[in-house]
Amino acid sequence: MADFKTLRTTAENGVGTIFLDRPEKRNALSTELFEELAEALQAWRRDDRVACVIVTGTEQLFSAGLDLETMNWATEADRLRWYDATYYGYLELLEYPKPTIAAVAGATFGGGCDIAVFCDIRVSSPDGRFGFPQVRFGLTPFVDPLQRIIGQSQAKLLVLTGRRIDATEALRIGLIDQIAPEGKLHETARGIADEIASTGVATAVRCTEMLRRSSAMDPMAAYVYGHVQYRDVHWNPEIVARVSAARTKVQTRTKNA
């Protein structure tokens, strides 16, 4: 993994973790941060040692949103670099083949909230705060996948007003999936990631793909697609070995009962 200026990364026991690391800027999102986020994710795309990725900040802060200094472009090339960085950074999360978990705390605003929304699972500390205040500057957030997650009515309330909500309200409307105990945000996210990683990389990737694609299909197409995935996993040697081991364990337990 490369040395980054705006991120830190670790990989252990099947779980990769990306820490946003601009404390002096409250993890505000810059061109370089988006470029490094995409690079960090890409490095684990086909790494069979990583089954799940956590994107997080600290136990106190995820991201205050857009770094306004970033928009003070000196040249047209700088402006285009920003657009490319944001486009490919979010796209990498949207199309990422492995499950992603956003572990957020404190301010999770603007583009920081977008990053969380583009992840598959969202866990917050009790003091998490969410919203898209950039609309008050005239800027726009991503309405999708936000509206798929919380429904169009709740998305309208957040996107059209720029209001901010706390973790309790975010959990109620489905913007986050779980509130971690105080001081245990990273531990909680890691526990979920460990559960995912324990299923194996192949299963995590296939299930992520099925969850992402099936919602755009009619019920019959989704059924056929799901069955094809189920059939195909039986050819995976690792999965065959795990099923065989489980069968032997059950037979031994039955024999000794």
Image: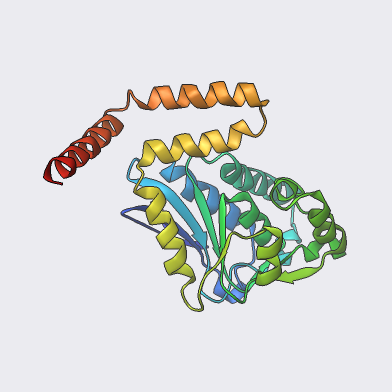
| In front of the other: 151 or 80 | 151
Q: Looking at the image, which residue is at 58% across and 51% down?
A: 119
| Residue 140 in sight here | no
Foreground: 125 or 255?
A: 255
Front residue of 167/97: it is 167
Q: Quadrant of residue 108?
A: bottom right
Residue 163 in the image: state x and y as whole percent.
Answer: 81, 68
Q: Quadrant of residue 254?
A: top left
Out of 112 and 168, give the one closest to the viewer. 168
| Residue at 87% over, 63% down | 161
Q: Residue at x 36, y 44 (%)?
A: 199
Left or right, 88 with reference to 131:
left
Q: Say above or below: 212 vs 50.
A: above
Q: How many marks?
A: 0
Residue furthest front as drawn: 257
Q: Can the viewer see residue 88 in this picture?
A: yes
Provide residue 257's location: percent of width, then percent of height.
Answer: 15, 46
- The residue located at (75%, 57%) in the rendering is 73
The quarter of the displayed image where residue 230 is located? top left
Q: How is the image coloured?
A: rainbow
Location of residue 174 in the rendering, given as x and y in whole percent from the top left corner: 67, 57
Q: Residue furthest left?
A: 256
Q: Residue 162 appears at what percent x and percent y? A: 82, 64
Q: Is residue 191 left or right of residue 49?
A: right
Taking the image as shown, residue 136 lies to the left or right of residue 223, namely: right
